[in-house]
């Protein structure tokens, strides 16, 4: 991907579509140990949007784990294991 003299690059359309980036959208560049990531500005700044997107993701994976008929509390207890095995000190 080539950078223009103004420091601009073109975000490929499939990526823009997937991220919901349109003309006028705000984006941010986040630098980490692997390089730089482009994110929609609202993802980083809007906790309500983050919560909604998390709930949407959670709904998308609902029912993909076989809990053998256990409710949520019983399943978490099963994952944690017996409390007797915990060292109190």
Image: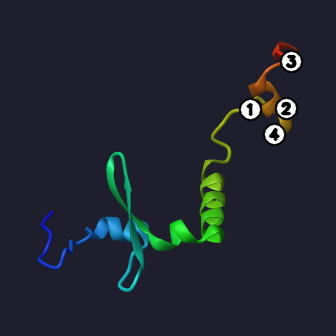
Above or below, comparing residue 58 to residue 87 in the picture: below
Badge number at residue 74: 2
Badge number at residue 67: 1
Q: Which residue is mark 4?
A: 72
User: Which quadrant is home to the N terminus?
Assistant: bottom left
* Residue that appears at 86% across and 20% down: 83
Question: Horizontally, is 86 left or right of 47 in the view?
Answer: right
Does label 1 or label 3 sit earlier along the sequence? Answer: 1
Q: Residues within 10 Å of mark 2 (few under 14, many from 20)?
A: few
Q: Secondary structure at mark 2?
A: helix
Question: Horizontally, is 84 left or right of 67 in the view?
Answer: right
Q: CA distance from mark 3 to mark 4?
A: 26 Å
Asked if marks 2 and 1 touch (Cβ < 8 Å), the reply is yes
Q: Secondary structure at mark 3?
A: loop
User: Which quadrant is home to the C terminus?
Assistant: top right
Q: Position of residue 81 (x, y in %)?
A: 79, 21
* Residue that appears at 19% across and 74% down: 7
Q: CA distance from mark 2 to mark 1?
A: 9 Å
Give the number of the mark in front: 3 or 2.
3
Does label 3 or label 2 sit earlier along the sequence? Answer: 2
Question: Horizontally, is 23 left or right of 47 in the view?
Answer: left
Asked if marks 2 and 4 touch (Cβ < 8 Å), the reply is yes
Q: Position of residue 36 (x, y in %)?
A: 32, 57
Does label 2 or label 1 sit earlier along the sequence? Answer: 1
Residue occupying the far bottom of the picture: 24
Badge number at residue 44: none
């Amino acid at each position: 991907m080539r950078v223009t003299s103004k420091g601009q690059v073109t975000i490929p359309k499939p990526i823009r579509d997937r991220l919901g980036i349109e003309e006028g959208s705000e984006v941010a560049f986040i630098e980490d140990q692997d390089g730089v990531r482009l994110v929609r500005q609202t993802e980083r700044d809007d906790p309500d949007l983050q919560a909604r997107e998390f709930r949407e993701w959670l709904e998308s994976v609902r029912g993909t784990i076989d809990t053998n008929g256990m409710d949520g509390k019983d399943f978490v207890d099963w994952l944690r294991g017996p409390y007797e095995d915990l060292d109190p000190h």
